Amino acid sequence: MGDKMACKPTAERLLNQARQDTEALKAKGIHPHLAVVLVGENPASQVYVSNKVKTCGELGIASTFEKLPADTTTEALLALIQKLNGDDGVHGILVQLPLPEQIDESAIISAIDPDKDVDGFHPVNVGRLSLGEPGLFPCTPMGVIELLKDSIDVLKGKHAVVVGRSNIVGKPMAQLLLKEHCTVTIMHSRTQNPADVCGQADIIIAAVGVPGLVSGDWVKEGAVVVDVGINELTKEADVTRFCKEGSRKMKAFRKKGRILYGDVFYDEALEKAALVTPVPGGVGKLTIAHLMVNCVTAAKRKADV
Ligand code: GUN
């Protein structure tokens, strides 16, 4: 039986680092500044964006919040990006995804100045990551690497299996693990014998968006399991599959009619693993903390300090 893997200490370390760096930059007359752009009314995006702006305030990072209507065109959003690219006082630009479907998402991502691209989604930063060059890299995978460094003595040589191949998490996660000298396997929906493949992992990173996919028989004894999935469960049959009657999650479901659940079958995985991150209350904190680090990094590089 393993333990819940706490993400908060790593998130706090990153936030403290960003806070101290912000103070040092301000002492030199540089005020790190993040511009956050939200298009439309997606409720989850509104929560994420307000948490990002709030965290900037807590660390002394300046922020601008640009809220655009749901019917915004690609051209109008591109014009805003150009304005922010040209503003020397703005160090980081974040356009919250997903964008409404009339907007060309890849044109928007490619329009952001790569040195202000605090999400690390621009093709130039994707290339820099795969070449092992300095750049700005995606916040969730970067935060997960910091968590693993805080939790595992030696990453070098470990077999890491990444479940999922998204541009935001799976692919950059695999690149960052490679940089740490892990042996890396990427699994996806067409992978054959998934339990056998995943069952070889010392480290499992689940980021696929399928609730409870990583069941106990996918987990090797003593593995470290990081759950990046956030899925909403609203059907009783799904919840009873993963959560015991009388558990905290089940009580929450009975009260609210919905719960958030990860990509890992938590109770089963915990029986085998050494450590498993919870959902919610897990890696989400790391993402936002690393966004702050990226913003300060962008400001430092611009000032060449
Ligand atoms: N939507 C979900 N995750 C992210 C993220 O990390 N960055 C942005 N910009 N949008 C997101």
Image: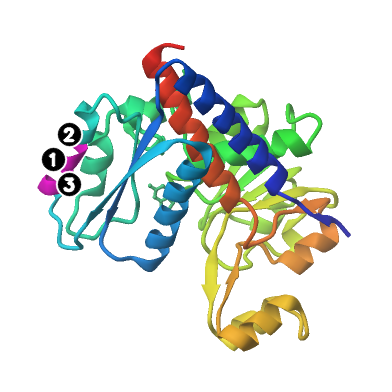
Question: Mark 2 touching mark 1, by CB under 8 A?
Answer: yes
**Closest to the observer, 232 or 190:** 232
- Amino acid under disc 1: Ala
- Amino acid under disc 3: Leu
Residue beneath label 1, please?
79
- The residue under the point 53% across, 82% down is 234
- At label 2, counting other C-alpha atoms closer than 10 Å, the crowd grade (few under 14, some 14-19, many 20 or more) is some
Secondary structure mostly taken by the magenta-highlighted segment of the chain: helix
- At label 1, counting other C-alpha atoms closer than 10 Å, the crowd grade (few under 14, some 14-19, many 20 or more) is some
Residue 82 disc label: 2
For ligand 1, tell me if the residue under mark 3 lies within 8 Å: no
Helix, strand or loop at mark 2: helix
Q: Pinpoint residue 109: horizontal percent, then vertical percent.
A: 28, 40
Task: Point out the stretch of residues depicted in magenta.
Answer: 75-81
- In this rendering, the answer to whether 240 lies above or below 275 is below
> Is 240 situated left or right of 186 in this image?
right
**Closest to the observer, 167 or 63:** 63
- Amino acid under disc 2: Gln
Q: CA distance from mark 3 to mark 1?
A: 5 Å
Q: Quadrant of the N terminus?
A: bottom right
Question: Mark 3 touching mark 1, by CB under 8 A?
Answer: yes
Quadrant of the rendered structure where residue 282 is?
Answer: bottom right
